[in-house]
Amino acid sequence: MEKGIQLYEGKAKKVFATEDPDLLIVSYKDDATAFNGLKKGTIEGKGVINNTMSNALMKLLEEKGIPTHFVEQLSERETLVKRVSIVPLEVIVRNISAGSFAKNYGVEEGIVFEEPTIEFSYKNDALGDPLLNGYHAMALGLASKKELETIRDLSFRINGILREFWASCGVDLVDFKLEFGRDHGGDIILADEISPDTSRLWDHGTKTKLDKDRFRRDLGGVEEAYAEIMARVQRNLEV
Ligand code: UDP
């Protein structure tokens, strides 16, 4: 499949058209941003790792019955995906307190929840991605009631699958962000990526952070953490 014109360049990825109107090529960059683009940098090798890891995890999810946009990895950094119209919501699932949850509710990081939580924020950089609930999302026309039900159901199922997978890698899945889209037929499918950029991943034994928080919080060892988490995935999944 040949790369056509560039349709979009985001913070971590570029998107290209192909000759098939229902397929796109995503190309992963090493660029990293945090705090709504205020902090910028590069994580050497991140694009290759996130592309490969996200594809391996999407394949695992597909095998377990979750519909995703993944079609085929084309190269180290490039993947063929189904074209979707993105539902402008960031869906965040949490198993353990961290990040904005700990800050907003005044609790320490590391509290293991009895039940996972889910929250939505409105994907809108100009507004700073504000939190909203399902009724707000419907009022704004971002998704229908049925679509929100599907998104919630898929998100919790994805959490169950990923938690078990990460546990097999000796990793606690603390929280992660998902994005969904509507495919050609209007069905809701998982899109975007699942990677250390979009998930908090702590070593189970030591609670060492193996994710983008090392970049956000200037903890050092960023590239090493991405390489370590990739090596653990490679030991447990076909990539
Ligand atoms: N996250 C993301 N993109 C965002 C915001 C959050 O991928 O724009 C991920 C983040 O990596 C973490 C989870 O969503 O795994 C929860 O993030 P949180 O709300 O705690 O926000 P943060 O503390 O990162 O600002």
Image (cartoon, grey):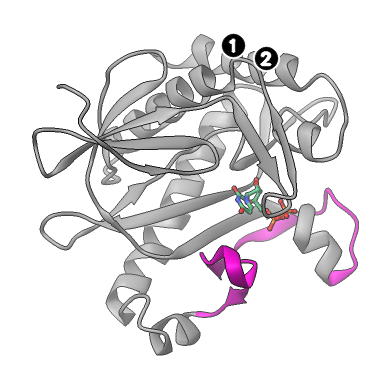
Q: Amino acid at mark 2?
A: Glu
As drawn, 149 above or below 96: below
Q: Amino acid at mark 1?
A: Ala
Of the pair 69 and 88, the residue shown nearer to us: 88
Residue 179 occupies which quadrant of the picture?
Answer: bottom left
Q: How many marks?
A: 2
| Image mark for residue 231 | 1
The residue pinned by badge 2 equals 228
Q: Secondary structure at mark 1?
A: helix
As drawn, 17 above or below 49: below
Tell me, yes or no, whether the two marked residues, 2 and 1, touch with CB atoms within 8 Å: yes
Q: Secondary structure at mark 2?
A: helix
Report the magenta residues as a range: 105-133
Residue at the image point whose x is 49% and y is 86% from the top: 136
Tell me the quadrant of the picture where the N terminus can be found.
top left
Residue 30 located left or right of residue 201: left
Residue 125 occupies which quadrant of the picture?
Answer: bottom right
Residue at the image point whose x is 57% and y is 78% from the top: 132
